[in-house]
Amino acid sequence: MAHNLNYNERTGKHAFFSVKQKAWHSLGTIVEDYPTSREAIGFAGLDFEVEKRPLFTPNTLGMDLLTNTNTIYLGNQHEAIKVPDAFATVRADTQQVLGVVGKDYKVVQNRDAFAFFDAIVGGGDGIKYETAGCLGRGERIFITAKLPDYIRIGRNDCIEKYLFLSTTHDGSGSITAAFTPVRIVCQNTLNAAMQNHINAVHIRHTTGASERLKQAHRLMGMSNALAEELTQVFNYWSRVKISDPQLKRLIELALATNPETTEALRSNKREVLSPLYINTVESVLEYALTSDSQKMDTTKSTLFGAYNAVTGYHQNVKVYSSDERKLKSVLQGAGMKNNQSAFDLCMAFATFGPKFLN
């Protein structure tokens, strides 16, 4: 499976760090204690600058354009034509071109991304950096950080609060920071997008530092409000019982990614269901009934456990070709959609009862 982590030939290390636990690729630097933002930048191989440089194209017309003011000369030899309003982003330590951007694009240095997180909780007090790294030549970086408080379900079941940040140096996307709760026991990545809520902020690279700081505090306010609501919802779900047949039905509906599958389930035309879909349902059901994290008082035969079965499958069971694909699936793709569907179904089950699944 391809990890796409950047390899720095100068240091002989992959650009990734993790606290205590190795990732599946077993690459990068593993540290025992949570680092400061400055230490994390070094551990993750993110201690490089990105420069925005003018972009040029070769002149193929010869010497008849020597009066062009956008040309560069070496002696009397005409060399290149400057591309108007276009720039290359270049990694300063390796001189690798990361992308092509416009004149309004502002480089957000890696240290600024960590400063964004430090600002959320006031100078970094209490924030714990879990993982960070960069992909490809260094064009995309990612950071996950643990916030100091928890979502508590029952007496002993806690969900940690995480922030995830990703940004690019190639002009392909905005800075994205998202709130993500994660179960301590099984490290399920839960989808925190609830009704009428947005769990992420997107900041353009044309935005100034003051606006990014404002967005950082906005994200923190959103995560706090969402955590309070999730605490109430999950605690209630942990007291709602669900039978094994009802559990399977909820899983089937949550994994139905198209109207045809949903219609087949509702009309009981199971012969048209694909083998891949049927096998996936069985895998999620097996996880729901056998995983240690599903045998707690808050999860065993409960609606909260049903929700965790779907999210836990995407985090702990499903095989992805790379960590990048896994993140995209859980935060933006099929995994996110399945998790959101499971959340909506559990909400409806809690409101209307088992009849909603028929």
Image: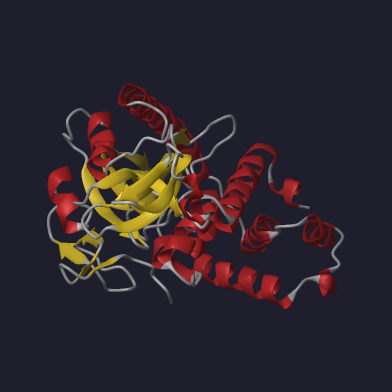
**In the figure, residue 7 lies in which quadrant?**
bottom left
* Residue at x 26% of width, y 45% of height: 110
| For residue 92, above or below residue 322 | above
Q: Which residue is drawn at 41% across and 34% down?
A: 227
List x then y, in percent, for residue 277.
69, 70
Q: Quadrant of residue 36?
A: top left
Front residue of 61/18: it is 61
What coloring was used for the rendering?
secondary structure
In this rendering, would 92 be left or right of 327? left
Locate the N terminus by quadrant: bottom left
Residue 299: percent from the left, percent from the top? 46, 55
Q: Looking at the image, which residue is at 21% across and 71% down?
A: 9
Is residue 130 something one can see in this rendering? yes
Left or right of 325? Residue 5 is: left
Q: Which of 139 and 83 is in front in this view?
A: 83
Q: Tell me which residue sits at (18%, 72%) in the image.
A: 12
Q: Where is residue 215 in the image (x, y as percent from the top left)?
A: 38, 27
